[in-house]
Image: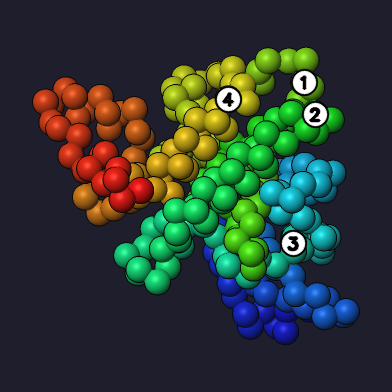
């Protein structure tokens, strides 16, 4: 299927992604799970969660494979890769037009709404960020990577978790503090807001000087900036261009 894993197209927190082909010629993405915690809980969680949902803005799981300790997920292939390569670049040729960014943002919002309201159970993704938004040949955005996702009945307003989930630069405050947390689906909405900042180039202006804005916790940055009587330089200055 993958021609001996020759065509690597991506790397995630839990493994590598390779381009592959089904017998009928359909191009697919094969994600090999190389790092697994809690006895493969992330793998099982992703199969169970994404295997029963269908939406144009959620990546489609075509199949999976378990052979001993080796695990793999097979997805539809997204030829334009992740949104991250278009939001974290200085290459003018990689920059997206405002109209396309708008359509991508709208598609992501629809996908999140579907996870929260359109499924039999409410699904919190817990890791909405540019790296987990994939783009097909038409730049239609699709939410991916459900290894941290959690589902619960819609009658409940929140779910209790015992450890933080997600990427520091995108997680909501209720996920950042404390040991036992009551978290609602609105934590994904906060992450979506941070993703929008990344899409218009604002997140690169916060955090460490090395540009690792994904590791910069936004409320802490705001607090430190105000405490040190610093100005919010850069933010809002390019508003007319956006």
> Along the polypeptide, which appears first: circle 2 or circle 4?
2
> Along the polypeptide, which appears first: circle 3 or circle 4?
3
Confirm or deny contact between disc 1 and disc 2 (CB under 8 A).
yes
**Left or right: residue 209 compared with residue 138:** left
> Along the polypeptide, which appears first: circle 1 or circle 3?
3
Observer able to see residue 232: yes
Q: Quadrant of residue 228?
A: top left
> Along the polypeptide, which appears first: circle 3 or circle 2?
3
- Comparing labels 3 and 4, the label whose residue is closer to the camera: 4
> Along the polypeptide, which appears first: circle 1 or circle 2?
2
Q: CA distance from mark 1 to mark 2?
A: 6 Å
Q: Which residue is mark 3?
A: 75
Q: Quadrant of residue 70?
A: bottom right
Estimate how packed mark 1 is, as few (under 14), some (14 to 19) or many (20 or more) residues with alpha carbons within 10 Å. some
Give SS at disc 2. Answer: loop
Observer able to see residue 32: no
> Residue 52 at x, y = what percent?
84, 44
Give SS at disc 4. Answer: helix
Q: Which residue is mark 1?
A: 154
Q: Which residue is mark 2?
A: 121
Q: Which residue is mark 4?
A: 186
């Amino acid at each position: 299927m993958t021609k001996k894993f020759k065509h690597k197209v991506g790397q995630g927190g839990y493994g590598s992604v390779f381009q592959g082909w089904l017998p009928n010629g359909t191009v697919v993405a094969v994600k090999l799970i190389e790092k697994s915690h809690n006895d493969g809980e992330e793998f099982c969680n992703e199969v169970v969660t994404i295997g029963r949902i269908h939406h144009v803005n959620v990546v489609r799981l075509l199949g999976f494979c378990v052979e001993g300790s080796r695990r793999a997920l097979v997805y539809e292939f997204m030829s334009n890769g992740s949104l991250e390569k278009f939001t974290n670049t200085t290459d003018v040729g990689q920059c997206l037009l405002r109209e396309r960014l708008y359509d991508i943002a709208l598609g992501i919002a629809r996908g999140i709404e579907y996870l929260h309201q359109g499924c039999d159970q409410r699904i919190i993704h817990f890791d909405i960020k540019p790296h987990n938004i994939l783009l097909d040949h038409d730049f239609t955005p699709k939410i991916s990577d459900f290894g941290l996702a959690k589902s619960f009945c819609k009658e409940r307003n929140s779910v209790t978790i015992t450890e933080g989930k997600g990427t520091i630069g995108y997680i909501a405050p209720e996920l950042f503090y404390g040991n036992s947390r009551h978290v609602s689906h609105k934590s994904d909405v906060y992450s979506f807001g941070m993703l929008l900042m990344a899409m218009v180039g604002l997140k690169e202006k916060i955090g460490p000087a090395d540009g690792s804005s994904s590791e910069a916790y936004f409320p802490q940055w705001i607090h430190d900036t105000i405490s040190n009587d610093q100005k919010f330089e850069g933010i809002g200055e390019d508003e007319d261009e956006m």
